[in-house]
Image (cartoon, helix red, strand yellow):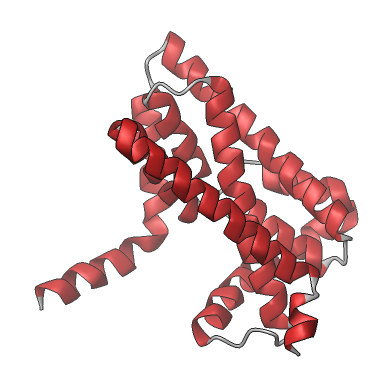
């Protein structure tokens, strides 16, 4: 079984995600020595993406003076890294290669979100995944998009090409929208604050329980 697991595409995706993560750690570590403020921003942007805050990560980069290429490349890099882990984890858990209880619960939540959108996207195939990932709504994103692609039996190439092209398009749109607001109206701080609030809303209950637990 071990040989079969290592021979799967999903295992290779996990290896790819691990390699990308190690590169990211080294990259942030170098900046931690040479430019702590930049290292802190890079870490915060990564944390924002972990909680589904694609727009928040882009806003952080702009607020800290990152240029167009560095902002778009770094945010896209993080999204690719996250998809490698979550897609591989989803497939390996549903095919019984991985039976970790925490992983199963996490993937069950993602499956629920994907199933809610699956029938709407199914008639459109590749373009449906692309648009789903690109549109900036709370339930959309590359993680859920790639899982829907798997449910629709798209090939890995078609699934990931739609997912990553949609992600890249969304990041570019977010960047230039934020840049427009910052350059002409200096409104990005307020927009950014609103996005942070929206990102945190689903986690307010967990945050409250955590604080109450600490007090006890």
Q: Position of residue 169 (x, y in %)?
A: 69, 34
- Quadrant for the N terminus, please: bottom right
- The residue sitting at 75% across, 80% down in the picture is 5
Is the residue 171 above or below the residue 132 in the image? above
Residue 58 located left or right of residue 69: left
Residue located farthest toward the top when viewing the structure as drawn: 184
Q: Nearer the viewer, residue 174 or 73?
A: 73
User: Does any portion of residue 97 appear in the rendered image?
Assistant: yes
Is the residue 189 above or below the residue 115 in the image? above
Q: Quadrant of residue 188?
A: top left
Q: Quadrant of residue 201?
A: bottom left
- The residue sitting at 50% across, 19% down in the picture is 179
Q: Nearer the viewer, residue 186 or 34?
A: 34
Q: Nearer the viewer, residue 139 or 215?
A: 215
Q: Position of residue 53 (x, y in %)?
A: 48, 47
Q: Position of residue 58 (x, y in %)?
A: 49, 34
Residue 52 located left or right of residue 3: left
- The residue sitting at 84% across, 59% down in the picture is 156
Q: Position of residue 142 (x, y in %)?
A: 66, 52
- The residue sitting at 34% across, 27% down in the picture is 189
Residue 180 located left or right of residue 199: right
Residue 142 located left or right of residue 101: right
């Amino acid at each position: 079984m071990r040989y079969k697991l290592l021979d799967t595409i999903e295992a290779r995706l996990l290896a790819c995600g691990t390699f990308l993560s190690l590169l990211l750690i080294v990259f942030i570590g170098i900046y931690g020595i040479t430019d702590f403020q930049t290292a802190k921003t890079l870490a915060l942007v990564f944390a924002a993406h972990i909680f589904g805050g694609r727009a928040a990560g882009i806003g952080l980069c702009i607020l800290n003076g990152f240029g167009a290429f560095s902002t778009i490349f770094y945010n896209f890099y993080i999204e690719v890294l996250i998809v490698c882990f979550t897609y591989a984890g989803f497939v390996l858990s549903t095919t019984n290669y991985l039976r970790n209880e925490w992983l199963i619960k996490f993937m069950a939540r993602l499956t629920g979100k994907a199933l809610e959108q699956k029938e709407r996207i199914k008639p459109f195939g590749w373009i449906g995944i692309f648009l789903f990932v690109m549109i900036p709504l709370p339930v959309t994103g590359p993680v859920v998009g790639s899982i829907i692609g798997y449910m629709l039996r798209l090939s890995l190439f078609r699934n990931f090409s739609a997912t990553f092209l949609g992600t890249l398009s969304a990041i570019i749109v977010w960047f230039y929208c934020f840049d427009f607001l910052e350059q002409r109206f200096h409104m990005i701080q307020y927009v950014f604050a609103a996005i942070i609030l929206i990102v945190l809303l689903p986690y307010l209950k967990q945050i409250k329980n955590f604080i109450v637990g600490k007090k006890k």
